[in-house]
Amino acid sequence: MGPDGRDPFDHDIPPTEQELAEWRTWASTVFIPNIQAMRDVVVTKADLLIEQEMPPVLLQLCAHVSGYEITAARWAQGRYEEHLSVIPFPGRGLMEYTRDRFTRLKKEQAILLGHPVPEGRLRRLLGRTATESRRPRLFGRLQ
């Protein structure tokens, strides 16, 4: 973030060299390790997916991480032409996918345990259904 609290890449004024340096530090220290952990869960736990094939949103997540890994490798060489992954982070799609699959699994779990959960109670437990547009409490402030 810039000194004014805005995303340095999301407005008409180009980021300063200081903002870019701060971005590289933040991305290398916090963001990239977090998304790598997300990718590692997808890759190492793929056998737990409901689908027969890898969902496109999870493939996009993996591609996003790879794009940032290349960008970070260039930073390590002192090359600062790029500051983002070439593949955007699938924030909204990933949140919807995760919420939908979690809801589905909780319903199936309740049925298997002999305790079907009424839809209204499930909504309260999860914060929202997958079709509602507001962010679920489960995910905090992710976009």
Image (tube, rainbow, N blue to C red):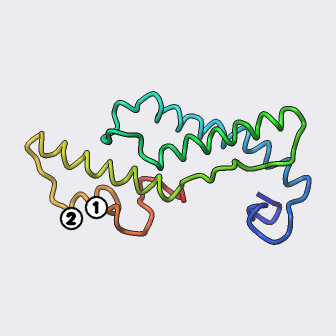
Callout 2, which amino acid? Gly
On the rendered structure, is 97 left or right of 5? left
Q: Can you give x and y, in whole percent of width and height, for residue 107 in the image? A: 20, 49
- Which residue occupies the extreme top position in the image? 44
Tell me, yes or no, whether the two marked residues, 1 and 2, touch with CB atoms within 8 Å: yes
Q: Which residue is mark 2?
A: 120
Front residue of 25/66: it is 66
Who's the residue at 43% across and 68% down the image?
Answer: 134
Who's the residue at 66% across and 43% down the image?
Answer: 31
Q: Can you give x and y, in whole percent of width and height, for residue 25 in the image? A: 79, 42
Q: CA distance from mark 1 to mark 2?
A: 6 Å
Callout 1, which amino acid? Arg
- Dot 2 falls on a residue whose secondary structure is helix
Q: Quadrant of residue 36 in the image?
A: top right
Who's the residue at 62% across and 40% down the image?
Answer: 65
On the rendered structure, is 27 left or right of 18? left
Q: Which residue is mark 1?
A: 124
Who's the residue at 49% across and 56% down the image?
Answer: 140
Quarter in which the N terminus is drawn: bottom right
On the rendered structure, is 87 left or right of 80? left
Quarter in which the C terminus is drawn: bottom right
* Label 2 crowd bin: few (<14), some (14–19), many (20+), radius 10 Å: few
